[in-house]
């Protein structure tokens, strides 16, 4: 099965985010800094960045990159070194002083942590710590690949805290690689939904549009990425719109579902110099979503 890659790139602002062979851009961050784009959501779609995209950098360094891309929402990941005037790493282990400093950094940049993940707490105590952190920072949802025996417990906690659980899909043999396995967790659990990683679905040989349809009404968040080959769990990432995913069809389906959650750019390639790729994705996103109006 072959998915169609979008060809609607001719009117992009002149960022060479990748070459004709599909590899990621070699542009430097200093070049990207001159192409800052406007922030905000478009027609109900909220764009963010999964901070794993900038995993080689500290949280504060990554925050600067997100800000220069004109994006104001993030999905934090546990374990990222904080940097700056903060010791330690992002997670439930942050002390009160560190949390206060982190809130100040976020406020100064005008950036909101909307979600965090992907986490797999081992027991109820760890889940409570995760929910406490999420509540303190005003998160909407937690991205997770939970232990199956925890479904009832985390659904209950999510209801108490008013924070949803979005189940993420990794490539096979991950327990949640198929939309069917996510639906099994969602059944009778009103506070559990899907974090739709459309790139991993394609790696698993699943048409992302069909998977989105199957999860209609249950999609809490989306991981926005593209890959170079369909039905290959080892397929490399490429810049969004340069690979095999049909993004106009994906956006159209999400629009049909009245999806109003966050799409987190998660670019797992060109790790050291991927800010131009993120900016390119932001521009492509804005262009495509504008066509849905």
Image: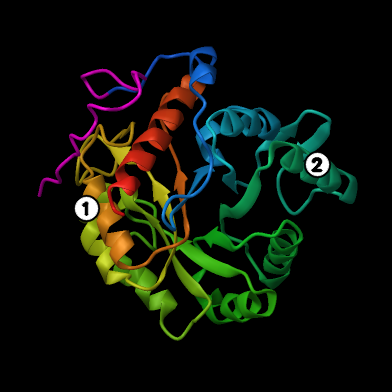
SS of the residue at dot 2? helix
Q: Main secondary structure of the magenta part?
A: loop
Residue placed most toward the observer, 79 or 24: 24
**Residue 18 occupies which quadrant of the picture?**
top left
Q: Mark 2 points at which residue?
A: 104
| Crowd class of label 1 (few under 14; some 14 to 19; many from 20; radius 10 Å) | some
The residue depicted at 38 percent of the width and 41 percent of the height is 286
The residue depicted at 15 percent of the width and 46 percent of the height is 3
Residue 86 higher or lower than 90, as above or below = above
- 21 within the magenta span: yes
**Residue 80 occupies which quadrant of the picture?**
top right
The quarter in which the C terminus is drawn is bottom left
Q: Name the residue under label 1.
A: 249
- 178 within the magenta span: no
Residue 9 in the image, given as x and y percentages of width and height: 24, 30
Write the start and end of the magenta stretch as one range.
1-22
Residue placed most toward the observer, 120 or 142: 142
Q: Is residue 178 visible?
A: no
Residue 57 in the image, given as x and y percentages of width and height: 62, 27
The residue depicted at 68 percent of the width and 79 percent of the height is 160
Left or right of 121 in this view: 289: left
């Amino acid at each position: 099965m072959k998915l169609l890659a979008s060809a609607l790139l001719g009117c992009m602002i002149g960022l060479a985010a990748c070459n004709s062979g599909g590899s990621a851009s070699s542009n430097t961050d200093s070049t990207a800094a001159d192409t800052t784009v406007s922030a905000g959501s478009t027609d109900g779609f909220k764009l963010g960045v999964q901070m794993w995209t900038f995993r080689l950098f500290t949280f504060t360094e990554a925050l600067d990159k997100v800000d220069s891309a004109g994006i104001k929402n993030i999905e934090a990941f546990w374990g990222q070194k904080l940097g700056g005037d903060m010791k330690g790493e992002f997670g439930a282990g942050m002390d009160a002083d560190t949390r206060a400093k982190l809130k100040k950094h976020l406020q100064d940049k005008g950036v909101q942590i909307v979600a965090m993940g992907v986490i797999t707490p081992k027991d109820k105590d760890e889940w409570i710590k995760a929910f406490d952190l999420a509540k303190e920072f005003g998160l909407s949802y937690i991205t997770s690949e939970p232990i199956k025996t925890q479904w009832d417990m985390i659904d209950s906690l999510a209801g108490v805290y008013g924070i949803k659980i979005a189940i993420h899909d990794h490539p096979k043999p991950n327990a949640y690689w198929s939309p069917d396995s996510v639906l099994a967790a969602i059944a009778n659990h009103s506070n559990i939904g899907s974090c739709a990683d459309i790139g991993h679905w394609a790696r698993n040989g699943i048409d992302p549009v069909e998977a989105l349809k199957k999860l209609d009404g249950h999609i809490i968040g989306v991981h926005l990425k593209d890959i170079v080959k369909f039905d290959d769990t080892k397929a490399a990432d490429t810049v969004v719109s340069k690979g095999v995913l049909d993004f106009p069809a994906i956006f159209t389906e999400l629009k049909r579902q009245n999806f109003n959650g966050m799409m987190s750019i998660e670019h797992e390639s060109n790790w050291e110099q991927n800010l131009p790729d993120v900016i390119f994705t932001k521009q492509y996103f804005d262009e495509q979503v504008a066509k849905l109006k």
